[in-house]
Amino acid sequence: MGILLLHTGAYHEIPFEAYVQKSILSLIVPFFFVTSGYFFGYKVWDQDEGTLWGKFLKYEKGLLIPYIIFTIINSLFAAYDMYSAGESFLWGMLWLARAAIFYPYGALWYIWASITGMLILYLFLRKNRLDLACVFGVFCWICGLLGNSYSFLLANTPFQKWIDFYIHIAVTTRNGLFQGFPLLLAGVLLAKAWKRLEGKKGIRIGIMALVISSIFLHGEICLVTERNASVEISLFFSQVFWVLAALTLLLNCKWSGNPDTMRLIRKLSTAIYFVHRPLLTCMRYFWDWRKIEIGAMQQFFWLTVLCLGICIPACLLWKKRRAV
């Protein structure tokens, strides 16, 4: 639901909106990345059946097919918007191609970043070089920060023009190389170390790490906000530690219910992520057509109702077919 709150802009109507956006909503996508990496790592380290290639292929296929479908849908909406704005056909096609390669429409950049980030991670795993993956992952994460919240550190340096050129071409450093790969790697490393973090010891470590990383995150938010980063403010160094600590605590909360229920919730979360932007676009087309003015919080409410109304029956149908 946090993604819906973010993309409808409803958080603007919440007290302390800037802090809520940076301290809470900016953690949602990193949490998705790390959690996804953990579950993939769990299959790699703790399950004997199947090859690494087979597990990688299953992960990529599970994202690639819906990604292609919803990329087409969102691109059609974007093409219509550009046509309505009077853009030329050639310019529209170039813009759509750029988006598909670097920053897909409809919030699908996260899915594309997961697909490409996992590909990079797989290349290290197949060679059993987690050590090199860690070195490269830290380098990528730092580069991502310098192209985002910490861009002010490069101001008036020879490196600034290179970052500006990259952002001009690729839009953002929030992609598979600079965000997806490092955070997926963090999740895989958590899965590898999980035996040592399970139980009371893990809970103590998780609580301590969560408190410390929360303090550092608050400090980072104050720092970059004061510096007024020129690109965007969404990536923070301490995010990865906060997410790892939170996930460690959550994983130590044992689920006593049916495992299928947890799988259903995960499917529901994924389904909502895919459908929410096309639904929001259609809703806004309808409101513009009917000349209805509606606030961001109302958009959030109606989008939530529609997403749940569509995705819950679809996920229940998936569960029923899976049981057959």
Image (tube, rainbow, N blue to C red):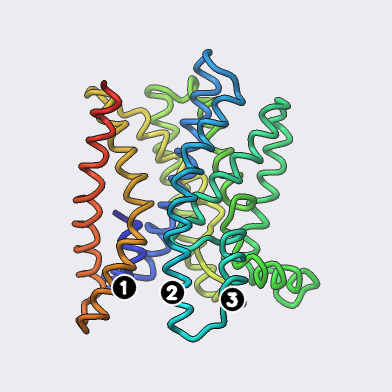
Give neighbour class at mark 3: few <14, some 14-19, many 20+ (Cα, 10 Å).
some
Outermost residue, front side? 89
| Mark 2 or mark 1, earlier in chain | 1
Q: Given contact means CB atoms under 8 Å apart, are the residues at marks 3 and 2 in contact?
A: no
Label 1: few (<14), some (14–19) or many (≥20) C-alpha neighbours in 10 Å: some
- Which tag, 3 or 2, sits closer to the chain's start? 2
Q: Amino acid at mark 3?
A: Ser
Q: Label 3 belongs to which residue?
A: 230
Distance from Cα at disc 2 to Cα at disc 1: 28 Å
- For marks 3 and 2, give the CA distance: 30 Å
Q: Which residue is mark 1?
A: 12
Q: Position of residue 277 (x, y in %)?
A: 36, 61
Q: Nearer the viewer, residue 316 or 80?
A: 80
Please report contact status of discs 2 and 1: CB closer than 8 Å, yes or no: no
Whole-angstrom CA distance, mark 1 to mark 3, is 21 Å
Q: Residue at x 60, y 46 (%)?
A: 116
Counting the numbered discs, the total is 3
| Secondary structure of residue under mark 1 | helix
- What residue did someone put label 2 on? 80
Q: Which quadrant of the figure contains the N terminus?
A: bottom left
Q: Is residue 74 left or right of residue 118?
A: left
Residue 109 in the image: state x and y as whole percent: 51, 56
Q: Is residue 95 above or below residue 191?
A: below
Q: Residue at x 63, y 53 (%)?
A: 178
- Which of the marked residues, 1 or 3, is nearer the chain's N terminus? 1
Relative placement, left or right, of 208 versus 232 is left
Q: Position of residue 199 (x, y in %)?
A: 38, 22
